[in-house]
Image (cartoon, rainbow, N blue to C red):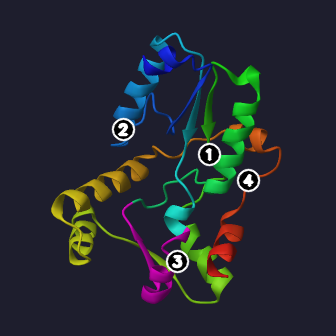
Amino acid sequence: EAAKAAGVQRVAYTSIANADDSANPLAPEHKATEDVLRASGLPFTILRDNWYLENYTGQLPQYLATGEVLGIVGDARIGAATRADMAVAITTALLDADTAGATFELSGPPITLAGLAETITEVTDAKVAYRTVTAEELTAILRGNGLDDATAAFVVALEESVARGDLDEPGDDLERLLGRPATTLTDALRAASA
């Protein structure tokens, strides 16, 4: 209503991958917001960001210190991309009037946590392995690292979502908007380790 009153010509909303069908704990709010936006009568563009590679590259010091990447996701694929690639794609969409009414699934080349560990090893020459843990073990580790019960449970719920495949969203929307291939995990890790 405020956007209408202000004469906003188009609303851009950054949502989550596969918001319509995802069981990710973040998805209900995003889907509800998308529904409100579609019903508003305002021109809109919805940009569904998948996970950010920085969710992993930002933990590089920890991975190197412990020699492992922990997770409950097994071999689930994650369409992660860098924040910089997402920003360029979103800007490109906003500068194109023809994207009004469009919904874009912004997913990068799929990665796995085992692949993350292998790539860290290749990039840094430090041996890092992926270790699968149970949800209960991950909860205990997170609590041992200082997270309160609610935050630990939320992080585990996110990991369970990844394990179910909620972030395995294929597509080429990101690269089409970029006009080039998305930044690879290898390049993102090189930048993070520089």
* Residue drawn at (55%, 63%) of the image: 54
User: Quadrant of the image for the C terminus?
Assistant: bottom right
Quarter of image, res 94:
top right
Q: Tell me which numbered mark, 2 or 4, is placed earlier along the sequence.
A: 2
Kind of residue indicated by mark 2: Ala
Q: Tell me which numbered mark, 3 or 2, is placed earlier along the sequence.
A: 2
Q: Are marks 4 and 1 in contact (CB under 8 Å)?
A: no
Residue 3 left/right relative to 106: left
The residues colored magenta run 57-72
- Please identify, in this view, whether the residue under mark 3 or under mark 2 is nearer the observer: 3
**Tag 1 residue:** 107
Kind of residue indicated by mark 1: Ser
Would you say residue 60 sits in the magenta stretch? Answer: yes
Any mark on residue 182, and which?
4
Residue 176 left/right relative to 81: right
* Residue drawn at (54%, 53%) of the image: 78
Any mark on residue 60, and which?
3
